[in-house]
Image (spheres, rainbow, N blue to C red):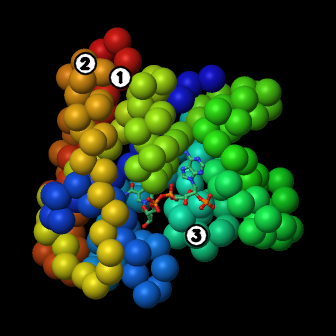
């Protein structure tokens, strides 16, 4: 099984990855009222099966699950990490697509036992930092914009230091996102174990 870390950070506020707002948990650009469809398409393409029969799974913390409105994204199994499994919503939609587990080690065991081909650790920061040392690949989007919003920012500066120390130099793919705030430069960084 391959383990991959995937996510996005903003240039401003520096290394922001999320925001706790009165609406709940959001990405910084969502909190500023902007969508980034190019980044979303990249996330979808990278985390969905590339060939028939391939099994892809997403591992995430509870608050990231809340930011998805506690509903699984299509075509991928979801492992949600929480120390309070009693708050799990046993909906029909979640029945076969999403599972609550107490830590990342249990997620890796469960994924290996059920023949997951690719496990993507999608956040938050604690899980990213735990997963990077065991990851085969790290995919981070840097969003070159300073977003303004109301809410409490969640940061993850450490991931860039960690990945730079542990991986060879990345490949970088630039893109420009057209948004209501004007064009925003994106850079898709891909670090691969062994280069
Ligand atoms: N920019 C991005 O790419 C990206 C990616 C993902 C998330 N986000 C954003 O980040 C924000 C959420 O971040 P967050 O810091 O609140 O993190 P989170 O990891 O989504 O949620 C934290 C909660 O998850 C559980 N948890 C996480 N790590 C755990 C561990 N190692 N062991 C046991 N339980 C663990 C705990 O839940 P319990 O309290 O239930 O035990 C903890 O309170 C949201 O705004 C989301 O939109 C952004």
Viewed as shown, does residue 116 lie left or right of 38?
Answer: right
Viewed as shown, does residue 48 lie left or right of 100?
Answer: left
Q: How many C-alpha atoms fall within 10 Å of the one at disc 2: few (<14), some, or many (≥20)? A: few
Q: In the image as oriented, which residue stretches furthest toward the front?
A: 83
Q: Which residue is mark 2?
A: 168
Task: State the quadrant of the N terminus.
Answer: top right
Q: Residue at x 65, y 69 (%)?
A: 70
Q: Residue at x 32, y 75 (%)?
A: 152
Q: Quadrant of residue 37?
A: bottom left
Viewed as shown, does residue 55 lie left or right of 185?
Answer: right
Residue 94: x and y, percent? Answer: 78, 62
Q: Residue at x 47, y 51 (%)?
A: 123
Closer to us: 4 or 35: 4
Q: Which mark is residue 94?
A: none
Give the secondary structure at mark 3: helix
Q: Does the numbered disc 3 mark a residue whose Cβ is under 8 Å from ligand 1?
A: yes
Residue 154: x and y, percent? Answer: 34, 63
Q: Residue at x 29, y 32 (%)?
A: 162
User: Does 37 appear above or below 134?
Assistant: below
Closer to us: 129 or 72: 129
Q: Which residue is mark 3?
A: 66
N-term mark: 2 or 3: 3
Give the secondary structure at mark 1: strand
Pointer 1 and pointer 2: residues touching (CB < 8 Å)?
yes
Residue 116: x and y, percent? Answer: 70, 32
N-term mark: 1 or 2: 2
Q: Which residue is mark 1?
A: 192
Q: How many C-alpha atoms fall within 10 Å of the one at disc 3: few (<14), some, or many (≥20)? A: some
Q: CA distance from mark 1 to mark 3?
A: 30 Å
């Amino acid at each position: 099984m391959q383990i991959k870390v995937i996510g996005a950070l903003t240039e401003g506020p520096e290394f922001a990855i999320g925001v706790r707002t009165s609406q709940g948990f959001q990405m910084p650009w969502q909190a500023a009222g902007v969508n980034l469809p190019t980044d979303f398409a990249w996330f979808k393409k990278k985390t969905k099966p590339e060939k028939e029969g391939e099994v892809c799974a997403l591992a995430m913390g509870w608050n990231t699950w809340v930011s998805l409105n506690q509903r699984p994204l299509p075509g991928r199994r979801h492992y949600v990490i929480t120390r309070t499994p009693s708050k799990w919503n046993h909906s029909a939609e979640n029945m076969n697509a999403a599972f609550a587990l107490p830590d990342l080690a249990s997620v890796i065991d469960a994924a290996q036992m059920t023949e997951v081909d690719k496990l993507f650790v999608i956040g938050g920061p604690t899980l990213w930092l735990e997963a990077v040392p065991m990851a085969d690949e790290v995919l981070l989007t840097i969003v070159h914009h300073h977003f303004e919003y109301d809410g409490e920012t969640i940061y993850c500066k450490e991931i860039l230091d960690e990945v730079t120390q542990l991986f060879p130099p990345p490949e970088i793919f630039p893109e420009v996102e057209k948004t209501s705030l004007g064009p925003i430069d994106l850079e898709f960084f891909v670090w691969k174990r062994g280069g």
